[in-house]
Amino acid sequence: MSSVDVSHTPRRRRATSDRPTSDALRHAVEGATSVADTLRALGMEPYNSTLRSQLRTWIAHDGLDTSHFLGQAHRRGKQGTVPLKRAADILVQHDGSRRTRTHLLRRALLEVGEAEVCAECGVGPEWLGKPMTLEIDHINGDWSDDRRENLRLLCPNCHAITSTWCRGGDQRRPLTGCQ
C-alpha cells in the first residue's frame, strides 16, 4: 500500500488570532453592541466561528460586561436602515438590465394613488372571501418600461386573456386538433 508524500506541503494553520491586549479588548467590548461588532473593532473577521468562540473566552477571562449586547435579530420588526425607494424613482423606463421586483412596483403604484382593483373588471384583492393577489401588467409587454402609464393591476383571470401574459408579447396560437 502506497501513501502520498505530504512532507513538502505546508501545515495548515488553525483559524486563530493573537489575543488582543486587555485594554484593546475592553475598549472594543464597551463600544460594541454584539460579538460581531467587537470582532470588527478588533480588526478581525466577524463571520469566523472560531474567532467568535475565542472572543467569548477572552471576554470571560477578563470578566468584561456584555449585558449591553443586543443579541441576534435585535432589529427584527423595525424599519431597515436603507430608506425606501420613492415611487418617482421606481416608475421609470429603465435599461432592461434587471427586472424591477414586483413588490416594489406594487408599492409604488399604491403610493401614487392606483386603486387596488382590477383595471378591467373592477374586482378587488379578495375573491370568494379569500385574499387574491392582483397582478401587475405591463400594457405594452415591455417589462423594462415601468412608467406609470404602462402599468396596471389585473386580476389573474383578466391578466390571463391579455396578449402580454406570460408570453413576452407573443400572440396566442389557436389550438389544433380540437373540434
Image: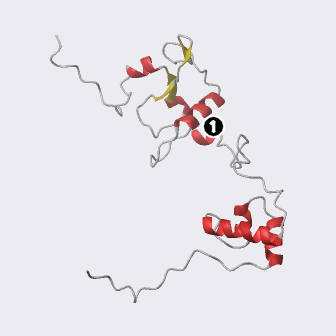
Q: Percent from the top left, x then y, of residue 102? A: 52, 35
Q: Is residue 102 left or right of residue 167?
A: right
Q: Nearer the viewer, residue 23 or 112?
A: 23
Picture quadrant where residue 3 is located: bottom left
> Residue, x 63% and y 37% (percent of image)?
87
Q: Is residue 149 left or right of residue 82?
A: left
Which amino acid is tagged 1?
Answer: Ala
Position of the C terminus by quadrant: top left
Q: Nearer the viewer, residue 48 or 116?
A: 48
The answer to whether 71 is drawn above or below residue 115 in the figure is: below
Q: Residues within 10 Å of mark 1 (few under 14, many from 20)?
A: some
Number of dots carrying numbers: 1
Q: Percent from the top left, x then y, of residue 86? A: 66, 40
> Residue, x 32% and y 82% (percent of image)?
4
Picture quadrant where residue 166 is located: top left
Position of the N terminus by quadrant: bottom left
The residue at which mark 1 appears reads as 87
| Mark 1, secondary structure of its residue | helix
Q: Nearer the viewer, residue 105 or 48?
A: 48
Q: Percent from the top left, x then y, of residue 172? A: 28, 24
> Residue, x 17% and y 19% (percent of image)?
176
